[in-house]
Amino acid sequence: MSGDRVDFDGQIVAFAEDLRAEGVSVGTSELLDAFSALELVAWGSAGDFRETLAATIAKSPEDRRLFALVFERFFFRAAELQALKLDVAEPQTRFGEGELDLDELRRQIARALSDGSDPDLRDLARLAIAAFGKGQGSGVLGVDVQRIRRALGLRSERQPELPEDDPRHDGIPREQLRRFEQALRRELERVQIERNQALPPKRALTDLDRSLPGGPVQDLAAVHRVVAQLRRRLASGGHELRGHSRHAHVDVRATMRASLQTGGVPVTLKYRPRRPRRPELFVLCDVSTSVTSASTFFLSILHALHDVFRKQRSFVFIERISEVTDVFLRERDFRTAAAAISRDAGVADISGYTDYGRVWSEFLAEIEDELHPRATVIVLGDARTNGRPPREELFAAITARAGRTFWLNPEPKLYWNYGDSVISAYAQYCEAFECWRTDQLEDFVRALTRPRVS
Amino acid sequence: MASEPQSVEEVSGGLRSVGYLPDGPTALVSFLATKLGKPVLVEGPAGVGKTELAKALAKFLGRELVRLQCYEGLDEAKALYEWNYRKQLLRIQAESGNAGWDAVQDDIFGEQFLLERPLLTAIAASEPVVLLIDEIDKTDQEFEAMLLELLSDFQITIPELGRIEARTHPVVLLTSNNSRELTEALKRRCLYLWLDYPELEHELAIVRIHSPDLPETIARKLVEVVQMVRELDLKKPPSIAESIDWARALLLLGADDIDQAVFRATMSVIVKHRTDLDTVAERVGVRLEPARAT
C-alpha cells in the first residue's frame, strides 16, 4: 500500500501548488497540518476529505471560495486521468433502459431536481445527454449545456401553459437550475474526455470566476495588503519627539515595583511608555460620474483604510460632502458598504457635477478645528471642476493645517491639466500621485518613505 | 472526565447531547482540534453560535472553560499575568531587617506573587481546559503577535521566572466577527472554521431543541420567516440566538400561529434597528395571513 500512499501525498502537494498558482497562500506548515489531520479523519467520504483540507488550508471566506473552485477542478481532473489510465468507463445509469418517452423524461427530471441528491443529479444529467445531446454537439460545453436545458424545458420563470402538477409550472428555483447545469457540464466534459482519451488543457480561473457574483473585479485583497503597508509607513513617520520627555506620565505601579529593589523607597521613577502616535486620517473620495470607473477602486481603498486605521474619518463628495465613516464602521462587507453609500450619501445636489470649491469650504467648515499637524489628508479625485472655480486658496488652508496632504488622481498623467482638470493648482500644495491600479497604490506607499520635500 | 473522543461521530453526538447541534464541518474541525491540539479560528457573522460552540465543547469534554474577552486596548497585564506588587511590598516590609537582600530578592518573584490572568490560568491548569479567546478581531495586531508564542508552543515566557510550559494541552478556540483581517501569522497556526447562518432544516432543529414545547408547525413557520428576513438588506440580520428568543417569546405569549398581528407585536425580538423594522414590516409582514377576527 505504501506505493499508493506516496502517490496520494503527491496529489495533495500538487493540489496545493494549484492553489498557490491561483493566489491562495498555502504555507508548508499548513500542508503538514493537512497531512496530520487526514491521518485522523476517515476520509472515505468526499465531504469529510474536503472539509479537512479546507480547515487546514483555506483560512478566509475569500480563500474558501477559491478553494472550492480549485478543489472541484483539480480532483475532477485527477479522477478522470486515473480513469483514463485504468481504462474505466462510466457504467450505465440506473434510471431504466429502452425507449425513452421524451415528455415523460422531461417531467421526471424536473421533479427529481427538487429532491435529488448529487449522485441522482449526475445520473439524470447523463440520461439527459443521452436523450437530447445527440450528435457530436457543438464542441463548446456552455452552448451544449444551454441547448440541453432548453430542450428539457427547464426555466426559472413560470410556465402557465403546463399542467398544475408539473413542477415546471411555477418555475424551477435558480439554485436547482444552477446545480443541474453544473452536473450537465461535468458529464459533458467526462464524455468528451472518454471520447478523446485525453484531458483538455487546464484552464486558469478567470477574474470572473474569482470575483463575488456581482462584486468588483478589482482585487480587494491586494488593496488591503497595500493599505496595511501604508499604515506602517504613516505610523512610523512624523512622530519625532518635540521637546524631550514632554508629557511624561509617571507609572505608579511600575515605580512601586522598581522601588522594591531599593526596599520600598522610590529611587527611580518609571514613566508610562510613550505609545507610538496613531496617525489620524481624513479621506475625501470623489464619487461623481467622471470617476465612475475608478470609484470602486477608491471605495475599496477607503474600505481597506478603515480596516487598519482606528482614527479615520471618511467623506465622499460630488457637489457637497457627506461623512460616511459610520457606514464603514457598521458594514464589514464591501458590497453592502458600497451600496449603502451610493444609496444614502446624498452628495449630488442639482447638476451632479463635482464642485471642488464648495467641497473645500464645507470640509473646512466641518472639521477645521480637528485638523492638526499629525493629521494626514488624502484626496481621491480627478480634479475636474467642470468649469467651476477651483478655490485653491481654501485647499491651501486645509493643507496648511494638516500635517501631510496627498492627492490620488485616477487619470493617467497625460490627461492632467487637460480640459477642465486643475490638478496643478492643487498639486502645488500637496503631493499628487497617479493612481488607478494596485501597483500604483504601492508606488504611492513607497513614495511616502522618501524624505519630505517641504 | 470524559475521555478524548475517537471519531467525528463521537464529537458530533457529544455536542448534540449537550444541546449544541453541529453541522458536518463543525464536528469535524472540533474533532481535529482535540486530536491535533491546534487552536481553531472560528469566523462568521454575529450570533451563529461561535461562543456557544466553545461552551458546548467544554461541557462535552468535561473541561473547565477559561474565557478571555478581547477588547481594544487589552494588554498582557490583563491577558497573561501581573505581579502582585502590593503583596510583594507587604512581604518586604514583613521581612525587613531579618532576611538578607538575596533571600528577599529571590522570594518576591515567586509564583505566589503572580496574579494569573486567563491565558496563564489556561496554561498552568493541572486539568486540561478549553480556552476561549473571544472576538480576537477587537484587539490590536500587537496583541495577536503576543499570542503567537502561546498558540504554537503552549508556553509563556515571564522574564523573572522563565518559561512556563503547559502542563496539559488546552483546546483553544478563537472567535472573530471578521471586523478586520487577522494576520497571516496567526491564521497559519490555526485550523479554520467558517460558521454561517444554518440551512432551514438545521435551524429548525436548533429552535426545536431550545424550545421543545413550541408546536412543530409554528417552529417551521418561524424559521421560514427568519430566513426570509435574512435575505433582506438589513443592518443587522437576525441570528440564531434571536430565532431562539423569538420562539421563547411566542411560547410565553401562547401564540398558536404567526399571523400579521403576532408578527408586528413580536417583530422587535428579531429585528433591532429602527430602519430595519420598517423594511421588515413592509416586505415580510404583508406576506403573512392577516389576523383572524376573533
Image (spheres, coloured by chain):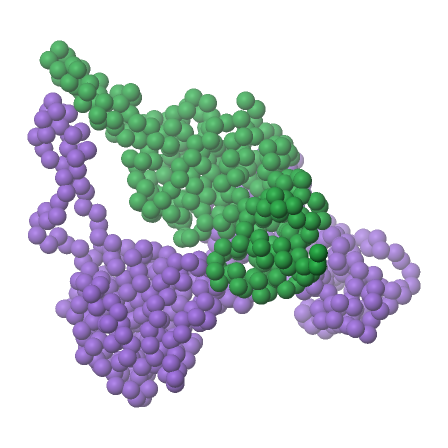
* Quadrant hosting residue A256: top left
Residue found farthest to the front: B294
State whether residue B94 appears in this view: yes
The residue closer to the viewer here, A92 or A5, is A92
State whether residue A92 appears in this view: no
Look at chain B in the picture and name its colour: green
Decide if residue B183 is on the left or right side of residue B226: left
- Quarter of the rendering occupied by the C terminus of chain B: bottom right
Please give the name of the residue rendered at 27% of the width and 72% of the height, measured from the top-left corner: A363
The residue closer to the viewer here, A56 or B151, is B151
| Placement of A291 over or under A405, stated as above or below | below
Please give the name of the residue rendered at 40% of the width and 31% of the height, measured from the top-left corner: B154
Note the chain letter of the purple one: A
Decide if residue A377 is on the left or right side of residue A1: left
- Quarter of the rendering occupied by the N terminus of chain B: top right
The percent coordinates of residue B214 (x first, y second) are: 67, 43
| Placement of B126 over or under B233, stated as above or below | above
The percent coordinates of residue A47 (x first, y second) are: 64, 46
Please give the name of the residue rendered at 45% of the width and 67% of the height, measured from the top-left corner: A340
